[in-house]
Image (cartoon, coloured by chain):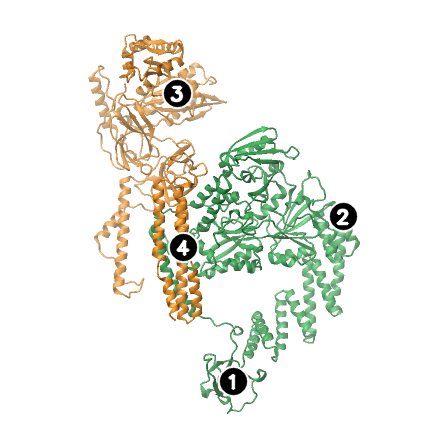
Amino acid sequence: MKQPALNTNHVPIAPHNHGQFGISVRSCLLALLFAIITTALGAAQEPVKIWEFSPYEVEVWYSFAPNVNASETAQQTWLADVQADLERTFQAAWQVTMKPLPSELSGVVLRDFDRFTLDALRAGELVLVVADQHSATKTVRTFDAAIESLTEIACTAGIKQHLENSIGSLHLDEDSTQSKQLASLVSKCVVDAAGAASIEQKLKDASVAAALVPRWSLPQDSEAVRPLVTPLPWQTDTLFRKLDKLFFVSIDQVGDDTEIHVRELDCPMQFLGPAMSDRATNWSYTARLATSTLARAFAPVARVEDAESKTAVLRLRAGGLIVDKHNPASVVIGDVMQPIVRRDDRNGIPTLLEPLAWTFAAITASDGVKMEANVYTYSGGPGLQGRKNRRTQRMLLKVRPIVPQTDIELLVRDDNRPQSGCFVYSRDLLTDEFELLGRTDWRGRFTVHVPYELGGVLPEAIRYERFLATKAAEAQRAKEASEADAESQAEGGASEGEPSSQDAPVEDTSVEEVAAKLKSLPQAGHDPAVIPLRAPLTQIYIKNGDTVLAKLPMVPGLREIEIAKLPDDTRRLKAEAFVRGFQGDILDLIGLRNLLAARIQLHLKNGKTDAAKATLTELRQLRNYNEMAAQLEAIQRRMLDENAGPVSISSKNRIDRMFQTTRDMLQKYMQDNLLSDSEKAVGGL
Amino acid sequence: MIRSCHFVDGAQALAVRLTLLLAVCFSSSQLCAQDSITRVEPPLIDQQPFDLITLNAANGGTSVKVFPLPFADRQIPASPSPQDKLRVILVRFPEREYEVLWRDIERVELYEQRVHAEAVSKLAAKDFIGAFQNLSYLLKHYPQMTRLEELRQEFLLKSAADRYQAGEYRQTLSALEELRATAPAYQSATVMRVLSQVADGLISAYQQASDLGSAKQLLNRLSEAYGSDLPVVATWEQKLEDMALAKRSEAIDLLQRKEYRRARQAATAMLSILPDVQEANQIVEQINREHPMVRVGVMQRTHELDATSLVNWSARRAGLLVEQPIFQFLETGAEGGRYGFALGAYRLSDDRQQLMFSLDPNIPTQLDAFGLAQLLLSRSNPDSEDYDATWAAIFQSVSIPAANQVLVQLKRPNVLPHALLQWTLPSGTSRETAEQLLPGLYQPGSQDDQEASFVIRPTVEQHGQPAEVIEVFYSDPKRAVNELLRGEVDVLDQLYPADAKRLASDPRIRIGTYALPTTHMLIPLSDHAYLANSKFRRGLLYATNRQGMLSGELLNSEDPNDGRLVSGPFPLGGGVNDPLSYAYNKSVLPLEYNPQLARLLLVMTQQELRETAKRTGQSVPTLEKLVIGCPDYEFARVAVQAMIQQWANVGIEAEMLVQSMEESLVQKCDLIYVTTTMWEPATDVQRLLGGNDIAATDNPYIVQALENLRVARNWREVRNALQDLHQLIDYHLPVLPLWQIADRFAVRKYVDGLEDRPLSLYQNISNWRVDLGQLQTAAR
């Protein structure tokens, strides 16, 4: 069983410790101390794993393609070289074992190396399922309990044979607990000659208590049966508990080249990374090539120690064992990590395992173990905050962008319709400037390319400080401007722009404070506080008309497609289109009314009565308040017409607000006495 | 392109705008008042006539304006008695009559004398236009005035001399001939000498321009008018005859060498001088027999060839010669247009979700059912170079149920899926490949700045249709008309409306009108800060007297069939019952000309931009001079020039940039004048505003309205979506609609087969027949 990692308090982080790894002596001493303690405790108790001082338990499953131009000996030498290279590269951060890819998995893995899934990998594994309604299984929740309490486990003859063969190939010590448990399992297996269909039916009928079935044949009706985590030694459930990382390595021959393909499986998070590959013509280079590809495919892991809405403190796995900042297991300032959440039930069975969508952390400070990070998450997203308990883990994996671009696909949350025509902006993480990238196409897709320059970020504390300083400076400027206005009005005649003693700077404490704060604002040139990013972290904004639909932090190139499900905004946008246009009409009308009224006054002043009367006629012919209000009403009715499709409550409220605002403006600026005043003026001649 | 994005609450924005508006209205009323105070004294001839009485020094020596004095024959009494009184009405106090003693008067200047004196001084200052205006005024209102005829003759001679020095021989000749005709005795020797020099110069110029026909016409006229008095006539008649004979030899030589274009030019030149020579007739007939050709005068050069272009008239015109689109719009119908399928027949299923193509094996093309299916598939693939998003959005799958059939399944019902297939094939590959797949009857030949030739493909069976079509470019429509009249060109495309009216009376010419109108609009292109503001764009429309321009300098016609204003990019057709107008929302009226409101909107835009700049801490954008891209043809040039003048009146400076052959205007312009052939709004508006063309809009409201149109399942939904779209385009102005125009062409009657109302000039080119023998009659 994998032991729970302990929290430990370590050296406080030196702020803005760019690239300085002050690990070394203190960390090594601690590691040594820990080693002494665990040794002293003896083998009776398994060592307690300390997160930052436990190396990654790594297995590399390799497969040589039959056409590889290397003899058996050369392959063995190659493997030894890779193992040695890996140890040199990762040093104490990894404990690596190399094994051939199990033959039963080679089909799944090698058929589509870039895209095979965890489900495909596990499809052939055996699962112990218990009938939910059977009296003997009511309290059975684990594999161990099942083996202990059940008397019979149904299976097919093939399954039993497979089980026996697999156990036999393990060469276990007969006296070991594991051997005894497996022997017990085999002994309880009862072959149902009628086959898999019969077993499935019996499970549904609860006429058998339990059965051992391949995962792919698990009954769809999950209410009748309950699958248990089945930690057979050769199966992934065991691997997931034992290992931190599992790498699949395929060595292939393509023409004169040897191609190396690598994929990482993060075992605790059950997360398959992207496939990395490289090729070399000379066989002697390929061992080193494999190591570098493995290093690229490897994602260091960090754990969330503490998190605010925009920041988090992280702890790096095996960080205490990394003495070289070039070690691929290290995470340095500017790296970007993606969080994954795992939530287990009380039996340690994961009920939730997924990357946190549209959420990333950019490392802003690090002492090699403990790290500070800015957290970027979607609008309304929790970031890395969340309920803290033993069964919920928030881990972060360093991102590995592999494709040159990522398509964002926007769908309507309820019915998965594509959201086409939404405008996609990117917002600079430093300057907050927006750049219009384009709009989603008919599929709701927009392609975000990996930028040439990766940009940078400011540590959140500094950014916030500068933000406050800017606000204070603006407020101060506004205050000074209004005071200056008031003074010039009071003096009543000082010409605008004329220099006076009043314009001279005045000693003011608040201004000095603001100025001091402003000094920390980024200058035109190099800003030492800016942290250059090492991955293309981007903040994407989705805008529909005047409304921002979503803020979506992303790393372009991480995946080919990222899907975001957003609320349906089409009705609101349509209403906005008409309301905005109608407001333009109102503006024109008010302008015309005032122009005509002014013209009437001018005619009257010049004694041109007939012209004034003619202009008054023009003024009367303009649309009046009632006509405009009726038109607005008609537009509103149309926009909210349910015959054209349902309107969500939130959309309806927003639409109503838009119309009410326009109606208020109409009342304010069109229900005036302009016409009657003009009529009086003309009629009073 | 970086654009700042400021998310401002809509209500706040509206409140700010309205507050600004009222502030601006107040200031604009002051502007109105100020405008009325500033007055400029009009020219003398535009003022109400008045005489000027100057009192002598003893009475102050002042001059007063009085209403014209009632002297007999407007002659000032020679020696009035000093004690007599002159009764006058002062201009300043028209209600009363005053009396003034003659003894107190220093002098009296009559109004016509002053106009005459002003004309003389203008003539001395070589202000011939001013002098002419004064002279015209006097000739009209005071024809009996003494010294007037003397002034007229002096004006004619001096202006002729001036024009001669400026090298403007035609004006010189005109002035001298008028002088000679009306006053033969006036400096007779000088006039005839200069007349001879001018005639010589003019004929030389015609000769140098190879315009022997005009030279001959001028000689004939001078010979009839002056005979032997003008020796230069006889000299030139001999010279021209020699030239005609040289042209005959040249034509025969070129014909033998099968250089038909040049042979025809030489024969035409010969015919224009010697129309009755039998040999000329034979040469022309031989050319016609061996290599029938048609010369088409065009106002827009053919930069590119695209038979399906929506915004490029010349590309669409000439494109049809060299390529066939898969689908081609043929005519309007009750529900959308009728289309021709280049490969056979097609049928849209009743549920509008399946499109069946039946390929005719007799049509010679390399594109078979598999090729077509592959093409339809490729156009829907985002990774393909030929990707067409509009097609991809409706395309579900394609199958080949039989060897000559292709069945397309659509994602959802669509009223006109085939209208989206107006493709030339395949756009992503070389033109050579396209020509092999669906070629037109002609292939591009030689091309230079002035002429582009299209030669019939060797594989096309000839039945007398033109073997060669030569497009001749004219920047000056007058010259084009003259060359049509002379037979240098046989057809003239995009005739200027006024020219069409003039030519309609010529028995040798037939005027045709294209079946469907073009819709003209301005398309904003740049990131010009003002242009990005919808109020400013609305201001531009308010500042444009579109109706005045249309009925005035552009069409010289009030007939709505010639052209009418539109409030959207959709054609209005012949009126409300025209099926072409199905997209047009008739409740949306074109904005009326209102320069005051335009000015108001401009000021509001300025204030709004200032507020925005203040809020964002950026510098206030200045109103840069707008650059308007203009296609190189007269109608557009006149329209753009007129708009520039009208916009200047409200304080918006602009300049015109005319499209040249070498480079695209798109990158250099803020706005571009575009003539669109939007005959199927249901799909064309997607191509115009939603595609990748110059008018593609980023306005979210328009984008969404286009999406609504795209998903419309039946004609009711399509019409509703289009009506909404029209309303929104009027509200937000992603394009500035101007007018629809009925375009015309002129054709010499010896060209047969060109319909009176074709959709496009070369639509039925295979039916054209040219009888060049009639040139002889024409020349005669």
For the residue pair B36 and B231, the one nearer the viewer reads as B36
Asked if disc 4 and disc 2 are in contact, CB closer than 8 Å, the reply is no
Q: Give the number of the mark in front: 1 or 4.
A: 4
Q: Are marks 3 and 1 on the same chain?
A: no
Q: Are marks 2 and 3 in contact (CB under 8 Å)?
A: no
Q: Looking at the colours in the rendered structure, which chain would you say is drawn in orange? A: A
Would residue B236 be visible to someone looking at this image?
yes
Residue under label 3, please give it: A121
Q: CA distance from mark 4 to mark 3?
A: 69 Å
Q: CA distance from mark 2 to mark 3?
A: 84 Å
> To which residue does mark 4 refer?
A627
Q: Which residue is mark 2?
A: B286
Q: CA distance from mark 3 to mark 1?
A: 119 Å
Q: Are marks 2 and 1 on the same chain?
A: yes
Q: Which chain is green?
A: B
- Residue B739 position, x and y percent, is 53, 53
Amino acid found under the numbered disc labelled 2: Gln
Q: Which residue is mark 1?
A: B107
